[in-house]
Amino acid sequence: MLKSSSSSILRRQNFLIRTLIGSHYNNQIHIINKPTQKLSAQFVSMTTTTEADSESILRRITPTLDPNRHKGQAGKVAVIGGCREYTGAPYFAAISALKIGADLSHVFCTKDAAPIIKSYSPELIVHPILEESYSIRDEERRSILSKVLAEVAKWMERFDCIVVGPGLGRDPFLLDCVSEIMKLARRSNVPIVVDGDGLFLVTNNLDLVSGYHLAVLTPNVNEYKRLVQKVIGTEVNDQDAAEELLYLARGIGGTTVLRKGKSDLISDGVTVNMVSIFGSPRRCGGQGDILSGSVAVFSSWARQCISVAESDSSTSRVNPMVLGCIAASALLRKAASMAFQDKKRATLTTDIIEYLGRSLEDISPAS
Ligand SMILES: NC(=O)C1=CN([C@@H]2O[C@H](COP(=O)(O)OP(=O)(O)OC[C@H]3O[C@@H](n4cnc5c(N)ncnc54)[C@H](O)[C@@H]3O)[C@@H](O)[C@H]2O)[C@@H](O)CC1
Ligand SMILES: Nc1ncnc2c1ncn2[C@@H]1O[C@H](COP(=O)(O)OP(=O)(O)OP(=O)(O)O)[C@@H](O)[C@H]1O
Ligand SMILES: [Mg+2]
C-alpha cells in the first residue's frame, strides 16, 4: 500500500519535472551570442527577453498537503541576521518562509536582538548567539567565534536552506563569524540565500560563494552596483542588463543572481529569466526581506521535486535555485499588488506578508 502510494507520488513528480522543463525553458531569455571569456563592459545586445512562466513554475514546485508527510518535510529554514539596529528584516524573512508553507523557521541573531524578534512572533525559533565587537573584549574573540560556530553546527545539517544577511549589520567581528557559518553551510551542501548586509560581506569576499551552485544572491540597486563594480570592474549598464547579469553570474562561477528592480532579472550564468508581473508602487522597506525568505522555501521545494526525478537525465538542465527565484519574485509581486489594492498609500511590509498565503492559494490551491 505504502509502496504503491509512494510510486504514484514518484510518477507524478517525474511528470511535473518533465512539464516543468518544457514550460520553463520555452520562456527564458535566449542568449544568441556566445559570450567571450573575458568579462567586458562592452556587451552586445543580442538577447530576446521574455517573461518566465512563473505561475506554472509556482504551481509545479509547490508540494501538495499530503497527510502522510511529517513536520519538516515542507521545509526548515534559518535566517542569519538581526542586530542592535535591525530586528524587522530577519523577522520579515523568517515569517514569510512560514506563511508560504515552510514547517520551521529559525533566526540566529545577536543577543540584543533576540528578545525583540521573539516578541514579534511565537512561531519563530530564535537563537541569541551572535556577538558584535562592542560587547566583547579582544582576548575573547577566538573563544566566542568557536562557541558561535559550535552552536550553529549543531543545527546546520537540519536546514534545507539558510538566508544570510537580512538586518545583519556590518560589525567586523560579527561578519567574521558569519563568514565561518557560510563556509560551514557550504561544506554541508546547505543552500545559501545572500541578501542585505550578507551581500556587503560577500562582495568583499567573493570566495565565500564563488562556484557554489547552491547559492543565490539577491541584490537591490545599491548592492548590485557594488557587485558589478567588484566582479566586472565597471559601472552598471542598464542598456544591456540581461547580458551584464549573465556575465556577472559567470564571473561568480555560476552562482545564481536575482537582480531586484522594476523587473526582477535572474541568471545562473547559463540562462537569464525575467519576472515583471505588476507588483506595487509602494517601495516601503522590507520587501526584499520577504523575497529572501521566499527564495529559501521555493528553491528547497524545487530541489525536492528535482531530486525525486534525478534518474531522468534531462533534469540536469533545470537549476532549482533559478526556479525558486522565479517563484518567489512572482509571489511577492502578486502579494504586494493585492496589499496595495487594499491599503493604497498605507501599504506596509506586514500587509504584504498577510497576502502571501492568499496569493499562493490563487495559484496553487491547498485542496
Ligand atoms: N525593518 C528593518 O529592520 C529593515 C532592515 N533592513 C536592513 O537594512 C540593512 C541595510 O539595507 P539597505 O537596503 O538600506 O542598504 P542599501 O545599501 O541598499 O541602502 C543604503 C541607502 O541607499 C538608498 N537607496 C535605496 N534604494 C535606492 C535607489 N533605488 N537609488 C538610490 N539610492 C537608494 C537608501 O535610501 C539607503 O539610504 C540590511 O541589513 C537590510 O536587511 C532593510 O531590509 C529594510 C527593513
Ligand atoms: N520599481 C519597482 N516596481 C515594482 N516592483 C519593484 C520595484 N523595485 C523593486 N520591486 C520589487 O520589490 C522587491 C524588493 O526589492 P527592493 O529593491 O525593494 O529590495 P531591498 O531594497 O533589498 O528591500 P529591503 O527594504 O527589504 O532591503 C523585488 O523583488 C521587486 O520585485
Ligand atoms: Mg534589502
Image (cartoon, rainbow, N blue to C red):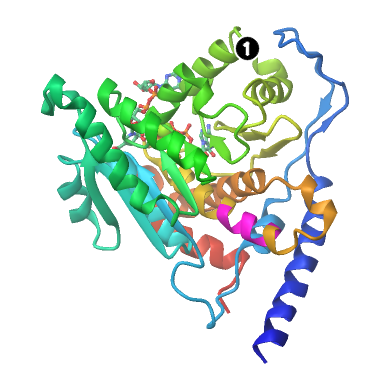
Q: Nearer the viewer, residue 42 or 316?
A: 316
Please tell me whether residue 304 belongs to the stretch shown in magenta.
Answer: yes
- Where does the magenta region start and end? 300-306
Q: Nearer the viewer, residue 249 or 153?
A: 153
Q: Which residue is mark 1?
A: 232
Give x and y (percent) for residue 140: 15, 27
Which residue is at a point 47% across and 64% down the rendered structure image? 101
Figure quadrant of residue 231: top right
Counting the numbered discs, the total is 1
Mark 1 residue element: loop
Q: Is residue 84 left or right of residue 187?
A: left
- Which residue type does callout 1 highlight? Ile
Which residue is at a point 66% across and 49% down the rendered structure image? 320
Q: Is residue 256 left or right of residue 39?
A: left
Image quarter in which the C terminus is found: bottom right
Give x and y (percent) for residue 83: 23, 35
Does any portion of residue 22 appear in the rendered image? no
Image quarter in which the N terminus is found: bottom right
Figure quadrant of residue 36: top right
Residue 110 sits above or below residue 225 on the image: below
Give x and y (percent) for residue 157: 45, 53
Q: Which residue appears farthest toward the bottom when viewing the image?
A: 1
Does any portion of residue 198 appear in the rendered image? yes
Answer few, some or many: residues within 10 Å of disc 1's Cα (few below 14, many 20 plus, some between 14 and 19). some
Q: Main secondary structure of the magenta part?
A: helix
Q: Quadrant of ligand 1?
A: top left
Residue 255 sits above or below residue 103 on the image: above
Which residue is at a point 20% across and 32% down the rendered structure image? 143
